[in-house]
Image (spheres, grey):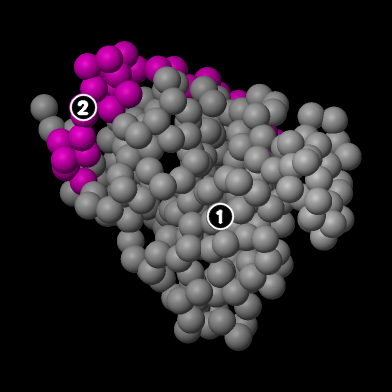
Amino acid sequence: MSDLSLDETQLDRYSRHIIMDGVGPTGQRSLLDAAVLVVGAGGLGAPAIQYLAAAGVGRLGIIDDDVVERSNLQRQVVHGDGDVGAKKVDSAADFVAHLNPDVTVETYDYRLNPDNAATLVSEYDFVVDGSDNFRTRYLVNDACTLAGIPFSHGAIYRFEGQVTTFAEGSPCYRCLFPEAPPEGTVPDCATTGVLGVLPGVVGSIQATETVKHLMGIGESLDGRLLSYDALAMRFEELPIEPNPGCPVCGAAGIDSMAEIDYAGSCAVAD
């Protein structure tokens, strides 16, 4: 056993981390001691789960109330043909168990909602938002921002994706998008389709941001929105400016999620 309690199998499994300057056994130990919540086991959540488990994040929470459909398999890489009809959280947990026995998976077979979001995110060090709807994105933002828990946001549409990281004391998702667009104005993947490899790129960036944060290395996307155009194979970066009047992260912001109406535009009550 090493002084950081890495056994021989772990020293072998994570050897390509351990030999890296800036990571070493200390960085690997920080991953093994960390807890990450992944919201959604779909297109974005799947590659994030895959790489976080492979990297050795010690505790992974996975929340999703959906079941695996065959149409998911073109992009949701932790599920297989034999999982069709199974709960996504169970399929994802089975995948992790086969990949890395060091990882403990906690599954939540229900939707994130205003009653459970604050309690759930408070149990984790970092949150990966792989959700596909605005209501859940605002729930993740508000619960994490109020609790001071950093999180990675990702979104995909046809051939395009975006990703950023929100940390304590920085602009939040509501600084970028104060309110949700009217229902029905933004089509989903079932309506418009999505390039199968696209969420792999965005979800992998989310996993990268998570691992860097947990090990305390590098520079995050905090304050920057990274936009990816797969057709043009081009990345662009946009600054995210803080909104001093933001009702969640601003100086005069709210104290509780109970002050927010999550129906419709997810607006904060005046």
Region rendered in magenta: 233-262
* Callout count: 2
Q: Which residue is mark 1?
A: 59
Query: Which residue is painted at 68% across and 66% down in the image?
Result: 101
Is 246 magenta? The answer is yes
User: Where does residue 59 sit, x and y in percent of width and height?
Assistant: 56, 55
**Among the 4 quarters of the image, the one containing residue 23:** top right
Question: Which of the two marks, 1 or 2, is nearer to us in this view?
Answer: 1
* Three-letter code, disc 1: Arg
Q: Mark 1, residues whose alpha carbon is within 10 Å: few (<14), some, or many (≥20)?
A: many
- Pointer 2: what residue? 254
Q: Name the residue: 53% across, 48% down.
A: 35
Q: Does residue 10 appear in the picture of this structure? A: yes
Residue 240 on the magenta span: yes
Give the residue displayed 65% in from the left and 44% down from the top: 31
Instruction: Find the distance from the CA under tag 1 to the CA under tag 2.
Output: 31 Å
Q: Earlier in the sequence, mark 1 or mark 2?
A: 1
Furthest residue to the left? 270
Q: On the image, which quarter does residue 233 sit in? A: top right
